[in-house]
Image: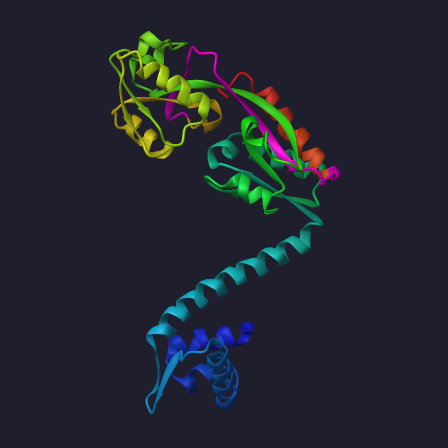
Amino acid sequence: MTTKQIDYCIELARTLNFSRAAENMFVSQPTFSYQIRLLEEETGFAIFERSGKGAALTPAGAQFVSFLAGMRQDLKRAIEQGQNFSARYKDSISVCMSVRQSLYLLPEAMRLFAEAMPDVQITPVFQYGNSMEMFLRGEADVVFALKEQTRQISGVQVHDLFESRIYLITDRDDPLAEKNLIREEDLYGRTLMVGGGSPAALQTVQHRLISSGKIEYFNSNDHDTTLTNVAAGRGVCLAPGFLNDHSGQFAWIPFDCSESFSCVLCTHREDRRDSLREFLSILNGLYRDAVAFPL
């Protein structure tokens, strides 16, 4: 299957007329029809039904063309990105973080890095739930992780980034938002949202609070749902500081507990590029200087 055949197929599906489609693709009708026939022979099923009035998509053909259209758009974007990259950059570093983590300091790190190494591109990659798997498949050069996630992984270089504590998230109008530190008794009589894939250290704190019998709770599917419930006044929640996007929408108040999270960046052990080392140094410095902010 060639890109030309894909384009011919998509155009015929749009016009449902061989003559018009061939004219639009600037080829003769026999050439156009021959390429469509070759494509159908390769796929092993009829994509179009021919008639004296033109062409019609078969049910299988309609499904096939919908996939082709999406694939062609992906290919177009890949080509455009490749053209942009080849015109400006000699190398690229892909960084996998969640949106909330990256919105805080990654843009500034990218700006500073561009000043130091303008011929190397930093490419953010956003994944939810499978970022480490993506990194291990070689689809990212750098991944944000908790140190506990890296202990059984080989071939990885772990770079300490910062220690993240636990915070209570409330609506900014909540009376608890006026406090500088939240203690367990401050939550008595309140509703605490739990679950949503919480890290082990956070689950420990949640279970300890719930076991007091003085705090109501309900399960929330994920962090986005939890924040929506907080905004709706349905409760409060505990969260690691590294999830703070610093948008100012919510109050993040330190919670009085010993549990915390060791946040790290992982790179592939064999990746010893100077550009990668420079980028890690910049990002590490930004996090080190951000100690005054909730992390």
Q: Is residue 125 magenta?
A: no
Q: How is the image coloured?
A: rainbow
Foreground residue among 257 and 279: 257
- On screen, residue 109 versus residue 231, left or right, reads right
- On screen, residue 219 versus residue 279, left or right, reads left
Residue 52, percent from left and from top: 33, 92
At x 48%, y 81%, the residue is: 41
Foreground residue among 269 and 153: 153
Residue 98, percent from left and from top: 49, 36
Q: How many numbered tags mark residues here?
A: 0
| Residue 123 in view (yes/no) | no
203 vs 153: above or below: above
Tell me which corner region of the image, top left, top right, bottom left or bottom right, holds residue 18: bottom left
Tell me which corner region of the image, top left, top right, bottom left or bottom right, holds residue 253: top left
| Residue 85 in view (yes/no) | yes
At x 37%, y 31%, the residue is: 196
Residue 49, percent from left and from top: 35, 84
Residue 183, percent from left and from top: 37, 9
290 vs 118: above or below: above
201 vs 139: above or below: above
Q: Quadrant of the N terminus?
A: bottom right
19 vs 208: above or below: below
Residue stretch in magenta? 248-274
Report the residue that reaches farthest toward the front: 152
